[in-house]
Image (cartoon, rainbow, N blue to C red):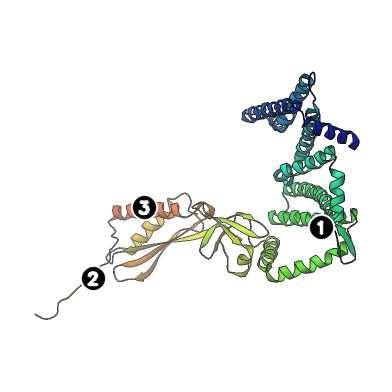
Amino acid sequence: MNKQFGHLLTELWNDFQQPDLLWQVGALLLCLAAAVLVDRLVRSRETGEGRAWEVGHRGLRRLAFPATALVLVLVARAIVGQGYHVNLLNLAVPLLLSLAVIRTVFFVLRFAFSPSGTLVGFEKVFALLAWSVVALHILGVLPELIDALESVAFTVGKQKLNLWLMLQGLATVLITLLVALWLGGMIEGRLKAAESLDANLRVVFSRLAKAALIVVAVMIGLPMVGIDLTTLSVFGGALGVGLGFGLQKIASNYVSGFIILLDRSIRIGNIITVGQERGQVTQITTRYTVVRANTGIEAIIPNETLVGSTVLNETYTDPKVRIGLPVQVAYGTDLERAMAVLVEAARSHARVLAEPPPRAFVLAFADSGINMELGLWISDPEAGTGDVRSEINLAIWRAFQAHGIEIPFPQREVRMLGA
């Protein structure tokens, strides 16, 4: 096979000395340009309804360019080959065929690894690397490249390594990692379906399973290519020093994240207040927690902050929350009547709980009037308290006007002594 392609490369080099190559280059560029146009046309078309249409459209998008280019190159080779050499087109055929096959394989793998979603982001990179290796093999350059990589050797402890061995180890570990992440995705899917298990425990178990599978994948992948794991002790020591100095905050956040998930002091959906941040917990990762405020702003809080500081959890054991509305009335007001008006204004609101019942209190005799407070309870603090405060305050204002109750403004009495 290598001799055959070596002969093909020799003939192709000879074609560079002849004007016939211009016909081959022109035909190849024309085929590639037409394939690009077909690819853009396929990508611009909208997919139909249903899962089958979506899968078929995605597969067609990945195969449109290499398949169209391959067909056009075969046709061009048959036409140009009647009067000219076609060594360049002969070389393009296996390269395009291998590209189509690799894209098909990775498209199938993408659906197989869909639970973890790991292959989705790196699909193009993996496909490009695989096609590059195949292209080097087709061109006959791969054996020389391997020899050059093996010539760059070095020693780590008692282990003799070279660049080719390191690349083999990297590829093997990568494959085992993909398998491990796929299994981790399956486990995560099973845990999500277990409704009887607490949500935080499901997250903990899924992440522990993925971490354990990744460690097992590395321990299996490296010995498969002859790399002794004891040689990694040097790198392990360096990593420990790095964690002790530069990465201690990151390590602390990861440990704190597992503590939060295990002790279940903070759960997704809780309304918490940390410092100046108040909102609903929408996501808990091993490094940070996302708190979404009623304004739509999301605060990303390091887990170390949640473990090492006071957190006000409004829905830790009971979702009911008390709201206090301050009100001031004039000194000539009938306080019992004013208290009844306040309670009635609270009861008229749909979100105010009947039990515990709303109550009005006389707090203090201030300079300009009597300070009162209306206390009420709600059971849905995640919906916010701004609308409740506004609507009840508006109801109090209307009720005070209807009953002739005055809300005083700041005032001072000045007396002139002497003539």
The tag earlier along the polypeptide, 1 or 2, is 1
Q: Quadrant of the C terminus?
A: bottom left
Q: Is residue 191 left or right of residue 318?
A: right
User: Which residue is depicted at the point 84% across and 34% down?
Assistant: 10
List x then y, in percent, for residue 53: 69, 28
Residue occupying the far left of the picture: 419
Specify the amino acid type for callout 2: Arg
The tag earlier along the polypeptide, 1 or 3, is 1
Q: Is residue 398 left or right of residue 412?
A: right
Q: Is residue 52 left or right of residue 162?
A: left
Q: Name the residue under label 1.
A: 215
Estimate how packed mark 2 is, as few (under 14), some (14 to 19) or many (20 or more) residues with alpha carbons within 10 Å.
few
User: Which residue is depicted at the point 79% across and 26% down?
Assistant: 86
Q: Name the residue under label 3.
A: 394
Q: Nearer the viewer, residue 75 or 294?
A: 75
Location of residue 272 (image quadrant): bottom right
Distance, label 3 to label 2, CA atoms, is 27 Å
Specify the amino acid type for callout 3: Leu
Specify the amino acid type for callout 1: Val
Of marks 1 and 2, the one in the foreground: 1
Of marks 3 and 2, the one in the foreground: 2
Q: Which element is circle 1 on?
A: helix
Q: Nearer the viewer, residue 178 or 287?
A: 178
Estimate how packed mark 3 is, as few (under 14), some (14 to 19) or many (20 or more) residues with alpha carbons within 10 Å.
few
Tell me the tag on residue 412. 2
List x then y, in percent, for residue 367: 30, 71
Distance, label 1 to label 2, CA atoms, is 76 Å
Estimate how packed mark 1 is, as few (under 14), some (14 to 19) or many (20 or more) residues with alpha carbons within 10 Å.
few
List x then y, in percent, for residue 402: 29, 52
Tell me the tag on residue 56. none
